[in-house]
Image: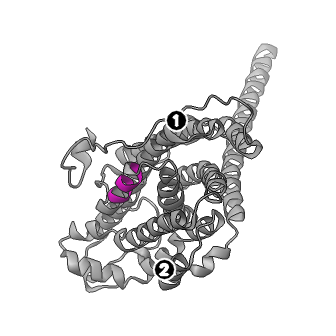
């Protein structure tokens, strides 16, 4: 079955074309480059992995409860709509929400792949080009994995959210070489990381937990790369140039906070757009989720040097200014450790199974040999 057949609403056009702007830049300076960035490049090479092998795709997923997360997280929970729904309807709602979430992850990862490739093309420094090339491969792997999960385990896709597509378009159309970093690696991937982390830490299902943990392990490197590159560059910019980038951040943050709420899912269940927006606005879970969405963005924005009065005021209005003091390095190291712990647990279980299998085979062989000896003596 083709992807087109799995979409709840097929995209109007199968191909979205964003006109390219800006220059492709070549560097003839082949010196070693920045030590920290080259170390990150080496780590990016060392940490490549194959989604077909590292992830156990044999694990079953129930499409009516793909994540096993509490129903209280669903916008309709506790409303008259929920009371009227049959268990079958509720299972269908869970399926749609998971499809919507992971579809946006999928579309975002394709956007990240394109942005990483754009960075390879446009960034002036060779060490940054080297690292971006490894990130392009990472993002391709992530899109492959999310696409496979949706096709094989959920059987449903949602089109890209209009506002996510708008932010992607704005990021890619900008001719300034640093904008793919800022739009994708700080804003879109920062929001995605928070969403990944919330599901990773609450799902009771092993397959989505593996997928999210392993993707987040890669993303920890990507955020570190964006911070290094932008922090160095933004120290050289004028106040006016910094304000332009802060305006972009403010607009992007409001857009993602207010427009990524899954209203499309509720509309597919016969709820009008305005009521769907109102229900989403009053969802306690969504309010908490919105605040957590900025747990990765605000400290990163502050770290790279975008922290002017207007930006701080916007974060005060959003209720997230205090997140600027969060320890981003600690969050990223925790992401890496969670993925490594999953590997250790899985490999330990597989090793135990192999040992038990060998012991059983030896036992059967020994038993067979003793029987043969008894038959010969008789």
Q: Nearer the viewer, residue 102 or 351?
A: 102
Q: Which residue is drawn at 55% across and 31% down?
A: 26
Is any atom of residue 190 visible in this view?
yes
- Relative to 74, say whether 101 is above or below: above
| Disc number placed over residue 290 in the picture, else none | none
Would you name the residue on which mark 1 appears? 25
Would you name the residue on which mark 2 appears? 314
Q: In which quarter of the image is residue 362?
A: top right
Q: Residue at x 47, y 59 (%)?
A: 188
Give the image location of residue 274, x and y in percent.
21, 79
Q: Quadrant of residue 20?
A: top left
Give the image location of residue 11, x and y in percent.
22, 49
Give the image location of residue 345, x and y in percent.
69, 50
Q: Nearer the viewer, residue 294 or 70?
A: 294
Q: State yes or no: residue 322 in magenta.
A: no
Q: Which of 243 and 66 is in front in this view?
A: 243
Report the magenta residues as a range: 166-172
Q: How many marks?
A: 2
Mark 1, secondary structure of its residue: loop
Mark 2 / mark 1, whichever is N-terminal? 1
Image quadrant for the N terminus? top left
Q: In the shown orientation, is residue 164 left or right of residue 288?
A: left
Crowding near the residue tagged with mark 2, few <14, some 14–19, many ≥20 C-alpha atoms within 10 Å: some
């Amino acid at each position: 079955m083709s992807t087109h057949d799995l979409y709840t609403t097929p995209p109007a056009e199968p191909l979205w074309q964003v006109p390219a702007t800006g220059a492709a830049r070549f560097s003839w300076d082949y010196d070693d480059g920045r030590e920290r960035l080259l170390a990150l490049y080496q780590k990016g090479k060392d940490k490549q992995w194959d989604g077909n092998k590292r992830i156990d795709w044999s694990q079953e997923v129930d499409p009516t409860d793909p994540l096993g997360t509490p129903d209280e997280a669903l916008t309709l929970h506790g409303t008259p709509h929920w009371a009227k729904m049959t268990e079958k309807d509720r299972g269908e709602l869970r399926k749609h929400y998971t499809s919507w979430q992971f579809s946006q992850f999928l579309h975002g990862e394709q956007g990240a792949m394109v942005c990483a490739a754009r960075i390879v093309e446009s960034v002036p420094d060779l060490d940054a080009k080297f690292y971006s090339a490894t990130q392009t491969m990472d993002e391709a792997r992530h899109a492959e994995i999310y696409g496979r999960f949706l096709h094989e385990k959920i059987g449903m896709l949602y089109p890209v959210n209009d506002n996510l597509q708008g932010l992607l378009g704005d990021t890619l159309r900008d001719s300034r070489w640093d904008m793919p970093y800022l739009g994708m690696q700080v804003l879109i991937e920062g929001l995605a990381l928070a969403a990944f982390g919330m599901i990773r830490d609450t799902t009771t299902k092993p397959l989505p937990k593996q997928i999210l943990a392993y993707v987040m392990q890669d993303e920890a490197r990507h955020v570190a790369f964006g911070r290094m590159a932008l922090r160095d560059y933004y120290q050289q910019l004028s106040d006016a140039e910094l304000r332009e980038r802060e305006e972009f951040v403010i607009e992007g943050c409001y857009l993602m906070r207010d427009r990524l709420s899954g209203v499309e899912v509720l509309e597919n269940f016969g709820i009008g757009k305005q009521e769907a927006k109102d229900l989403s606005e009053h969802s306690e879970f969504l309010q908490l989720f919105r605040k957590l969405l900025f747990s990765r963005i605000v400290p990163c924005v502050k770290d790279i040097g975008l922290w002017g009065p207007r930006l701080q005021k916007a974060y005060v209005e959003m209720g997230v200014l205090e997140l600027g003091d969060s320890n981003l390095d600690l969050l990223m190291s925790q992401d890496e450790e969670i993925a490594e712990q999953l590997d250790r647990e899985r490999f330990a279980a597989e090793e135990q199974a192999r040992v038990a299998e060998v012991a059983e085979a030896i036992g059967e062989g020994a038993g067979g040999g003793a029987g043969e000896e008894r038959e010969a003596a008789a």
